[in-house]
Image: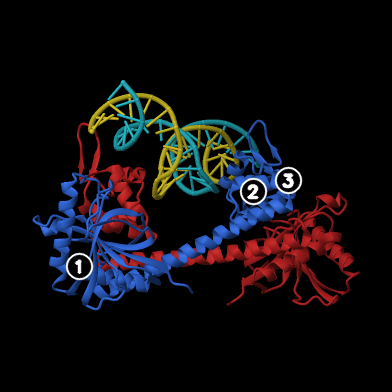
Chain colours: A red, B blue, C cyan, D yellow
DNA sequence: TTGCTCCTCACGTCACGTGAGGTGGC
DNA sequence: TTGCTCCTCACGTCACGTGAGGTGGC
C-alpha cells in the first residue's frame, strides 16, 4: 500500500489531482483509513489510472472517461466518441492554423508601419437587408459623390414622404459597388436604404432584398470619406495576407452619417464578401 | 445612441458579453442612464470593439487586450506579445497533431481487436535510479528466467545482509535489456534493485546509476509473466503507430512481485525510451 | 519534540452562459 | 394593461492550483 505522495511520485500525477479524482469518483484509493482519512493506493490500480491518463490524452473529459470506464460502453459507442473527438481536434487545428495566419499578418503589418494599424478587420455574417434602392452609373470618379448624394436624397425624400423612417440601426444608407474591378470609369453604383416596412415603388426606386453575406471582412472607418482609401488598403491587404478571396460586390454602410455634421463623427463600415482560399 | 440589443445585433456580440466587458472595464457604454441603468452605445465605439475582437482572434486574453488598448504599449512590446502568442499557437498545433495521431491509432486498434486494448500506453519521464546491479548473459531464452531469478536472489541476499531494504516503491527489481535487437540467443541481461542507501560492492554486484529517461513509453502489465508478450506487442505497436522511435534499452520494473504469491497480483511496468520521430 | 506528511475546507481560474426575480418603456 | 427589454444578483462551467489551518506519524 502506498501513501498518496508515493503513488504520486510513481505516476507523476499530482497528489491534488489524485484527491480530485477521488472526490469525483473517477479513481479512488484502494483503502482509506477511517480515522486519519489517509488515502492508500495499490500497484494493482495502476492500469486503471493509466487508462484514465490515456483517455485524457485523447481529449475526453473526466466525465466521459468515467462513462467509458464504468458504464461498459460498446466498442461502437467508444468509436463514435473517438470520431467526435477526432473532428473536434481537427477543428481546433484549423482554428490554430488560422490564428497563426492572423498573428503573422499582424506582425508583418506592424513591421511595415511601425505600429498597430487603426483598421482592425473582423469577420462577420451580414444578414439580409430589406431596402429601397436606386441604381446609377458615374462616368468618372469625380461624379460619383454628387451622384450618390442625389440618389440618397431622392431615397430619403421618398421614405420621409411615406413617413416610414425609423431610428433602428439597420435603417441606414448602404452603397454597393457591383463591379468586381475598380476601373475608375463608368462606375456602377447602387444606393440602398435599409427599410423595415414596405414602400410603394417608382420608376427609379425599387424595393430590393440585399442577400445575406455568409462571411464578410469588415472595417469600421471612422472619420471623413477622404481617408476611406487607407481603410480600403488595410482591408484588402488583410484579406490577401490571411488567405481569403473576395467573392462578391463590396458595400459601404453609413452607420453614422450626417452630411451637414462633423465628418470626424462619421462611421462607415466597409464590407467585402470573402471566402477562405482553398488549399 | 443604441440600446444594448441594437448594438449587439449590429456587432454580433451577445448582450451578456457586452455587459461583461463593461463590468471588467474593457469596453464601456458611451452613456449609462443613471436612473434605469440602461446602457447606451454609439457607432463611434465600433472601432474599439473591433480592435478588441481582432486581438481576441489573435489569442490575447481580455486582460492583455486591456493592456494593449489602455496602457499605450510600444510597438516592440506588442510584437513581443504577438511572438509569444505565436509560439503558444504553434505549441497547441503540435499538441492537437499528436492528439490526432493518438486518436487514429486508438481507432485502428479498436477496429482490429473489436474492443479497447487493456494495455494503455502512457508517456512519462523516468528519473535516475540508484541501484545495486548484476549483469549476465542467457545463452537461450529458456535460461533467462532461472538466471534472472538467481541474479535477483543474490542481490536480495546482499541487500538484506546489509539491512538496507526499505519499503519505498522506488526500491524494487528492474530488469534491463541492453540489446536493441532481440535475437533470442545470448541475451544480455542486467538485474538491478533500486536502493536509496549505498552498499559495499562485490565481484558481481556493483552500485550503478541508471540514467534518467526523458521520455519513456510505458505499459503497466497486470498478471503473470506468461502474458508479457501481449503487453510488449501492444506497446511496440503503439510506439510505431504514433510515430515514435525506440532510442535505448528497455526495462521491466517489478512494481508488485512476490515469487511465491499469486501471479495475478503482479504488476510489471514495461518501459521503452522513445523519441518523437523527426518529420 | 520537531519537521514532514496528510487531511479538509474555501476560494480562484477564464470568459462568459443560465436562470431568477424585478423594473422601465411603449 | 401586456409583452418586451433591460437591469442586477447569484450560481455554474472544467480540472484542478493555491493557500489556510489543523492533525497524524516517526
Q: Are marks 2 and 1 in contact (CB under 8 Å)?
A: no
* Residue B65: numbered disc: 2
Secondary structure at badge 2 equals: helix
Is there one chain holding both mark 2 and mark 1?
Answer: yes
* Residue B72: numbered disc: 3
D7 left or right of B185 in image: right
Decide: is B213 above or below C24: below
Is there one chain holding both mark 3 and mark 2?
Answer: yes
Q: Mark 1 lies on which chain?
A: B
Q: Residues within 10 Å of mark 2 (few under 14, many from 20)?
A: some
The single residue placed furthest to the left in the displayed view is B260
Q: Name the residue under label 1.
A: B228
Decide: is B20 above or below A57: above
For marks 3 and 2, give the one nearer the viewer. Answer: 3
Q: Reading the chain from its start, which is encountered first: label 2 or label 1? A: 2
Q: Residue at x 84, y 56 (%)?
A: A224
Secondary structure at badge 3 equals: loop
Asked if residue B78 shows in the view, the reply is: yes
Q: Position of residue B198 (x, y in %)?
A: 28, 47
Say which of A28 and A258 sits in front.
A28
For marks 2 and 1, give the one nearer the viewer. Answer: 1
What is the distance, in whole Å, between disc 2 and disc 1 at their CAs? 55 Å
- The number of numbered discs placed on residues in the rendered structure image is 3
Amino acid at each position: 500500500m502506498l501513501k498518496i505522495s508515493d503513488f504520486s511520485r510513481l505516476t507523476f500525477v499530482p497528489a491534488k489531482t489524485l484527491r480530485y479524482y477521488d472526490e469525483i469518483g473517477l479513481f479512488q484509493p484502494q483503502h482509506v483509513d477511517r480515522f486519519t482519512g489517509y488515502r492508500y493506493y495499490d500497484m494493482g490500480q495502476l492500469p486503471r489510472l493509466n487508462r484514465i491518463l490515456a483517455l485524457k490524452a485523447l481529449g475526453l473529459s473526466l466525465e466521459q472517461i468515467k462513462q467509458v470506464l464504468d458504464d461498459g460502453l460498446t466498442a461502437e459507442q467508444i468509436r463514435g466518441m473517438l470520431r467526435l473527438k477526432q473532428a473536434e481536434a481537427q477543428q481546433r487545428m484549423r482554428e490554430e492554423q488560422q490564428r497563426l495566419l492572423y498573428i503573422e499578418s499582424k506582425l508583418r503589418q506592424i513591421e511595415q508601419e511601425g505600429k498597430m494599424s487603426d483598421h482592425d478587420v473582423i469577420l462577420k455574417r451580414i444578414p439580409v437587408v430589406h431596402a429601397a434602392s436606386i441604381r446609377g452609373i458615374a462616368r468618372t470618379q469625380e461624379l460619383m459623390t454628387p451622384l450618390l448624394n442625389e440618389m440618397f436624397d431622392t431615397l430619403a425624400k421618398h421614405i420621409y414622404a411615406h413617413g416610414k423612417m425609423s431610428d433602428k440601426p439597420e435603417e441606414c444608407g448602404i452603397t454597393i459597388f457591383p463591379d468586381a474591378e475598380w476601373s475608375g470609369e463608368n462606375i456602377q453604383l447602387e444606393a440602398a436604404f435599409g427599410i423595415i416596412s414596405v414602400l410603394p415603388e417608382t420608376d427609379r426606386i425599387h424595393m430590393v432584398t440585399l442577400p445575406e453575406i455568409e462571411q464578410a471582412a469588415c472595417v469600421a472607418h471612422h472619420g471623413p470619406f477622404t481617408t476611406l482609401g487607407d481603410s480600403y488598403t488595410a482591408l484588402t491587404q488583410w484579406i490577401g495576407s490571411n488567405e481569403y478571396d473576395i467573392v462578391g460586390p463590396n458595400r459601404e454602410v453609413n452607420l453614422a452619417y450626417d452630411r451637414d455634421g462633423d465628418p470626424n463623427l462619421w462611421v462607415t463600415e466597409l464590407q467585402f464578401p470573402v471566402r477562405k482560399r482553398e488549399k
